Amino acid sequence: MGVIYLIVIGAAAGFLATRMMKVETGIVQTVLIGIAGALIGGLVIRMLLTVGGLLGGLIGAVLGAMLLIWLYQTYLGRK
């Protein structure tokens, strides 16, 4: 169940993050960005704020995905 949860939250977080950051990506890239963001943001948010539950995970996932997009655009992407 944890993998399915990660994919669903990752897809939602990736969608929200790519729309907030105005990045055009495909479905697979959006889900991968969201999953990576969920891993990064979820760990950071839970460690720093000890926020639990679905809402805390979604907020952390979106923030992590936005950070990942920003890092990609800053260091690897076209400007």
Image: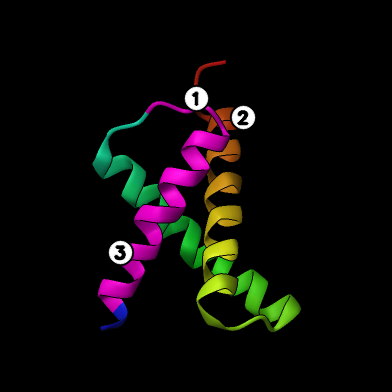
Say which mark, if any, is on residue 7.
3
Span highlighted in magenta in the image: 3-24
Q: Main secondary structure of the magenta part?
A: helix
Please name the residue that numbered disc 1 is placed on: 77
Q: Is 23 one of the magenta-colored residues?
A: yes
Name the amino acid type tagged 2.
Answer: Thr
Between disc 3 and disc 1, whose residue precedes? 3
Q: Is 35 one of the magenta-colored residues?
A: no
- Please tell me whether residue 55 is drawn above or below residue 25 in the rendered image: below
The reply to whether the C-beta atoms of the residues labelled 2 and 3 are less than 8 Å apart is: no
In this figure, which colouring scheme has been used for the structure?
rainbow
SS at mark 3 in the image: helix
Quarter occupied by residue 7: bottom left
Give the number of the mark in front: 2 or 3.
Answer: 3
Please name the residue that numbered disc 2 is placed on: 74
Please state if 18 lies on the left or on the right of 29 as rendered.
right
In this view, the residue in front, 55 or 32, is 55
Please state if 34 lies on the left or on the right of 76 as rendered.
left
The reply to whether the C-beta atoms of the residues labelled 1 and 2 are less than 8 Å apart is: yes
Name the amino acid type tagged 3.
Answer: Ile
- Quarter of the image for the N terminus: give it: bottom left
Q: Residue at x 26, y 40 (%)?
A: 27
